[in-house]
Image (spheres, rainbow, N blue to C red):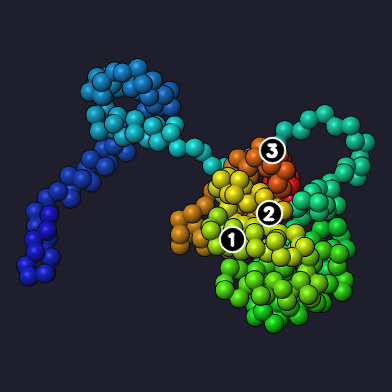
Amino acid sequence: DRVDNDGDYTPHNCQWAPRTHQTRNQRSSLANKLSRSDLMAIVELYQAGLSTPEIAKRFGTSREYITGLAQGFRLSRDIPKSYGFKEIALIPQKSNCRSRLDANTSSEVARGLYLDIPFIAANMSTVCNASFCSQLDKLGAMGILHRASSNEHLVYETTKLAKNSKIVAVSIGIGEDQFELVRQLVEAGANLITIDIANGYTDQVIILGRKIKNEYPVKLIVGNTTNVQMMYEVEDFADAVKVGIAQGLACETKNTAAFTEGQFSAVLKFKDVSRSLGLPIISDGGIREPGDLVKAIAAGANS
């Protein structure tokens, strides 16, 4: 409790604090006394309809503890689990390849666009410039030029990349000047445009994307999202969708905006829709080691 003296809050009746700490310590000690089988038995009795006081008496614990345990169980049951790559392991099936070198790893990373290696380097300022994209192109993979620079510099980098690569991929935002920028990029040699937004499931992205596809003969990637509904709204013009929010190691979106989802789970829920619409998905984020790329493909990503 607090008493307000002309705006100056002063504590009143502080006796509650020790009691609160006592109860918390008591609950902690009770939890330590109960085995896992006890906890599961409590949950089963609660589900069967036995009252909280009866369960508490049977296990020698408090009603508050039983209530908290039941609430936690309901949350764990009702809220869908979200798995990242580190929580997942793959089980190998019988292989008919004599050598891993015989495996065909080519994939349709965007409609009608195939890569021998389904690997796309992120369009971030510390990752992709024209030189790096060109090297990836030679290996059968690709990179996307980042948009964290002036429009003039982006056009310059696009021109450099177009001299050396089959795929000239460039990312843009959704500002008022971006449609004009696309015209300049296409004239400089770009043949793949990525609309790169933290939450790509927006009217601005959809309107701009449709406008670009109506005007220019380029491949178009839109993203990012973890909402499957976006697939149905962009499938008439998009060539691929980037899936993943805040799984990058340096990404702060989950800290500042509270949005994220385990990357394996995020990709997996897009799998069936991607196949039914014929719209490729790109798993973006969460890669910490080479095996994570394999897990992304296993979950249903094209690249």
The residue lying furthest to the front in this view is 214
Q: CA distance from mark 3 to mark 2?
A: 16 Å
In the rendered structure, which disc, 3 or 2, sits on the residue that comes first in sequence? 2
Label 3 SS: helix
Q: Tell us which disc is closer to us: 3 or 2.
A: 2
The residue carrying mark 1 is 207
In the rendered structure, which disc, 1 or 3, sits on the residue that comes first in sequence? 1
Residue at 76% across, 33% down: 92
Disc number for residue 237: 2
Give the answer, above or below, for where 101 lies relative to 124: above
Q: CA distance from mark 1 to mark 2?
A: 10 Å
Give the answer, above or below, for where 17 lies relative to 123: above
In the rendered view, does 95 fall on the left or right side of 127? Answer: right
Whether residues under marks 1 and 2 lie with C-beta atoms below 8 angstroms apart, the answer is no
- Label tally: 3
The residue carrying mark 3 is 276
Give the answer, above or below, for where 52 lies relative to 13: above
